[in-house]
């Protein structure tokens, strides 16, 4: 059924999405401790460092594929925040 297929796809993406959430939380915590640091930019940098040094764990690959959608949404929201700040 459609619901079972959706649950199966979502379930297999869960560990990778959790991995992204943990990295984002780490970036947010570090950015909060450093005045003027942007959490989104720090998360992108942290993700690049992890991917190019340690690599993406095999259990996280399916969920990490969502990074493009999440990154695009973050950039749009960051732009909206800056635009509303100028008003």
Image (cartoon, rainbow, N blue to C red):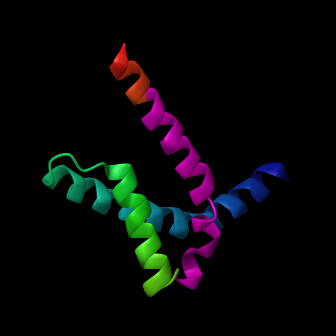
Q: Which quarter of the figure is the C terminus placed in?
A: top left
**From the viewer's perspective, is residue 57 above or below residue 29?**
below
Residue 24 in which image quadrant? bottom left
Q: Is residue 19 magenta?
A: no
Q: Residue at x 21, y 59 (%)?
A: 30
Residue 25 in which image quadrant? bottom left
Instruction: Say which of 3 and 71 sits in front.
Output: 71
Judge from the rendering whether residue 11 lies leftward or rightward of residue 28; answer left or right: right
**From the viewer's perspective, is residue 34 above or below residue 23?**
above
**From the viewer's perspective, is residue 54 above or below residue 35?**
below
Instruction: Say which of 86 and 21 sits in front.
Output: 86
Q: Residue at x 49, y 78 (%)?
A: 51
Residue 54 in which image quadrant? bottom left
In this view, which residue lies farthest toward the right?
1
Judge from the rendering whether residue 28 lies leftward or rightward of residue 71; answer left or right: left
The span shown in magenta is 57-80
Q: Is residue 59 magenta?
A: yes
**From the viewer's perspective, is residue 86 above or below residue 72?**
above
On the image, the x and y values in percent for residue 33 come to 14, 54
Q: Does any portion of residue 54 appear in the rendered image?
A: no
Q: Residue at x 41, y 76 (%)?
A: 49
Type of secondary structure dominating the magenta stretch = helix
On the image, the x and y values in percent for residue 83 come to 43, 23
Q: Residue at x 32, y 51 (%)?
A: 39
On the image, the x and y values in percent for residue 42 come to 34, 58
In this view, which residue lies farthest toward the front?
86
Q: Does any portion of residue 20 appear in the rendered image?
A: yes
In this view, which residue lies farthest toward the bottom?
54
On the image, the x and y values in percent for residue 26 come to 29, 62
Number of marks in the image?
0
């Amino acid at each position: 059924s459609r619901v079972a297929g959706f649950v199966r796809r979502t379930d297999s993406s869960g560990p990778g999405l959790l991995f992204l959430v943990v990295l984002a939380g780490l970036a947010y915590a570090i950015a909060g401790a450093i005045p003027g640091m942007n959490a989104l930019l720090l998360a992108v940098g942290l993700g690049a460092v992890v991917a190019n040094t340690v690599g993406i764990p095999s259990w996280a690959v399916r969920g990490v594929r969502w990074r493009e959608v999440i990154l695009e949404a973050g950039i749009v929201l960051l732009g909206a925040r800056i635009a509303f700040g100028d008003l």
